[in-house]
Amino acid sequence: MKNKHVVILNESIHDDGLELLKKQCQVFIEADLGFKSGNLAKADGLILRASGCLESTHLDYATNLKVVGRYGVGVDNIDTRACSGRKIPIVYTPKSNSRSVAELVVAQMMAIFRNTFAQDSAVRSGAWEIRNVAAGSELSGKSLGLIGLGNIGLEVAKIATLGLEMSCSYFDLRRNETAEKELGLIFLSLDEVLASSDVVSVHVPLLPSTREMISFRELALMRQDAVLINMARGGLVNEKALIEFLASGSLRGAALDVFESEPLEKSNPIMTQKNILLTPHSGGLTEEASQRTSVAVVSDVLAVLNGETAINVYNRG
């Protein structure tokens, strides 16, 4: 009988994907990718979620490795250059959680503009009169600026323009003339998007060129009553700068699902800001997205291990 492939996950995944993997492979779930147990040396495949990192030092021990799977969109926690040098392909899931993240972006916009959390707190404390001073405003007619128009940014644009009747501009390295025609999107420079939008939502990968792309200069371009939303990667926004602008009243508010260091420490000054909504890197963790993501990454990992063609390949090795 042919020996089963060995696949290590640094965290568990949705049962649909996990059971599919277990049917064909010997599966280990180890936070350190099997480094301490010695399973790393036997691994044919690795699947990483956002909490772990795959560095070149891991690959020195993973001499049998044939494929790396990224459960998610970004591959900033994988040493892609080292994988390429060893001709190890990387598969990922660029579309499986796009709708879930986009819906959280819109939910946070609504919560901020309708003062949802302040009203909830006031009602619980008996301050019913909050209804007269903090009912908020509609999103209809507001301007949304997207930094990045990839899969998630495009989903946000669809909901905002078609569902909420918001105007929408975007900045990206490439124009999407189809989206401009179908959704009425306007292509602008980064500075123009920042200066003209009621809401700015960030949707770009974390690269050396994008790290802290939103910092003091960029925040100073934004309207005083504007909102910043980051559901992409924490390193894209200079948190010190954001805190300063929020504390001084130079921004209406912000919503963050990702942070420079995760999980957040209680001592992080972000915790004390009242005009910011915080979620625990959970934008893509709905039941539906988790199911799609798990099956997608496992299917592509299995395809590579079985000598077949994977669908979503980030790096062919």
Image (cartoon, rainbow, N blue to C red):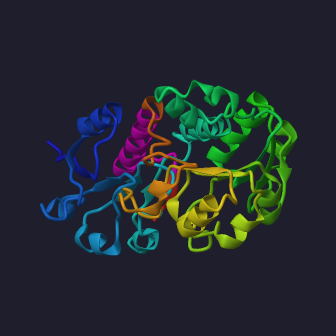
Can you give x and y, in whole percent of width and height, for residue 174 in the image? 76, 59
Tell me the quadrant of the picture where the N terminus can be found.
Answer: top left
Q: Is residue 87 above or below residue 71?
A: below
Residue shown at 81% from the left, 59% from the top: 195
Does 268 sit left or right of 283 as displayed?
Answer: left
For this rendering, which residue is in front, 186 or 317?
A: 186
Q: Quadrant of residue 182?
A: top right
Does 158 sit left or right of 182 as displayed?
Answer: left
Residue extent of the magenta highlight: 290-312
Tell me the quadrant of the picture where the C terminus can be found.
Answer: bottom left
Q: Is residue 128 above or below residue 134?
A: above
Q: Quadrant of residue 142?
A: top right
Q: Is residue 204 above or below residue 60?
A: above
123 in the magenta segment: no
Count of picture labels: 0
Can you give x and y, in whole percent of width and height, for residue 234 in the image? 51, 60
Q: Is residue 99 above or below residue 32?
A: above
Does 297 sit left or right of 23 as displayed?
Answer: right
Residue shown at 54% from the left, 69% from the top: 240
Can you give x and y, in whole percent of width and height, for residue 43 in the image? 23, 58
Residue shown at 64% from the left, 37% from the top: 106
Q: Main secondary structure of the magenta part?
A: helix
Does 254 sit left or right of 191 as displayed?
Answer: left
For this rendering, which residue is in front, 78 or 62?
A: 78
For this rendering, which residue is in front, 84 or 185?
A: 185
Can you give x and y, in whole percent of width and height, for residue 56 in the image? 34, 74
Residue shown at 69% from the left, 43% from the top: 154
303 in the magenta segment: yes
